[in-house]
Image: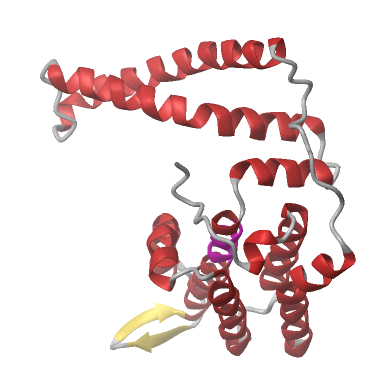
């Protein structure tokens, strides 16, 4: 089961995958192009995403848990005000760099909204539909092949890593101790080699069963109404971006 996908039958779920991919990409580009000092615009972008969650029946808590993946970038952003140079200002009695403070805000604001937009796409679109959507958008076949193999093989790698970890623990390995980091590093190397070899076997099995670089696509092109409704969030983001200029 894909932890990032939330099954449903909402209008957002029913949209063709290629429409949602283009809409998400356009939305993120608008966010990235927004000046970091246009604070109100980022609140507007978040409101647009919240409206999509309401239509798709996605609880904000469900989304917030999966957004924790950006924690390392948040930590980097928190350190930026103390590492930047130039003029300084005081925040809660602590002197911080103005340019560093703006850089940290830029990372948090744009990074968070970008992650939430990506999670919204993943939550309303199955992995297979994402690959098919890329095919319909004429994405290079190499990219489609890599995405297909990743989807088919990711669970195999995770299961293999769990088995290797269980085997190490049963032999007395305890990853909490620093002096056992060598065993962990060797395990990662072994996992890489075994994954590479198994990946070749998986690809060979796919080719022998008729795989020719593309997944079967039984659907037709997206209707104009689907494009119009699916690109509403991106169009709204574009209006917000123009309002900041």
Q: Position of residue 143 (x, y in %)?
A: 73, 34
Q: Residue at x 42, y 58 (%)?
A: 66
Whether residue 36 sits left or right of residue 90 in the image: it is right
135 magenta-colored: no
Colour mode?
A: secondary structure
Q: Which residues are magenta?
A: 114-121
Question: Is residue 174 visible from the viewing direction of this image?
Answer: yes
Vertical order, 113 against 141 (above or below): below
Q: Residue at x 62, y 27 (%)?
A: 149
Vertical order, 158 against 236 (above or below): above
Q: Residue at x 49, y 81 (%)?
A: 98
Q: Position of residue 23 (x, y in %)?
A: 74, 64
Q: Position of residue 49 (x, y in %)?
A: 58, 74
Name the image quarter holding residue 163: top left
Residues 89 and 188: in front is 188
Name the image quarter holding residue 165: top left
């Amino acid at each position: 089961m894909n932890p990032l996908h939330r099954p449903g039958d909402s209008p957002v779920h029913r949209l063709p995958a290629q429409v949602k991919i283009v809409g998400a990409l356009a939305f993120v580009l608008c966010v990235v192009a927004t000046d970091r000092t246009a604070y109100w615009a980022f609140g507007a972008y978040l409101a647009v995403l919240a409206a999509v969650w309401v239509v798709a029946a996605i609880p904000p808590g469900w989304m917030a848990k999966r957004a924790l993946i950006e924690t390392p970038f948040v930590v980097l952003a928190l350190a930026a005000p103390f590492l930047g140079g130039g003029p300084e200002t005081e925040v809660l009695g602590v002197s911080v760099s103005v340019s560093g403070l703006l850089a940290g805000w830029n990372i948090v604001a744009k990074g968070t909204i970008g992650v939430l937009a990506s999670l919204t796409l993943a939550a309303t679109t199955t992995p297979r539909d994402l690959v098919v959507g890329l095919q319909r958008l004429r994405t290079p076949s190499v990219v489609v092949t890599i995405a297909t193999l990743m989807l088919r093989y990711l669970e195999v790698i995770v299961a293999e890593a769990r088995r290797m970890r269980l085997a190490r623990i049963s032999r007395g390995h305890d990853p909490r101790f620093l002096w056992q980091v060598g065993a962990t590093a060797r395990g990662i190397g072994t996992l890489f080699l075994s994954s590479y070899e198994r990946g070749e076997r998986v690809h060979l099995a796919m080719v022998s069963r008729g795989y020719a670089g593309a997944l079967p696509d039984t659907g037709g092109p997206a209707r104009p109404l689907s494009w119009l409704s699916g690109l509403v969030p991106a169009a709204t983001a574009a209006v917000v971006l123009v309002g900041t200029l």
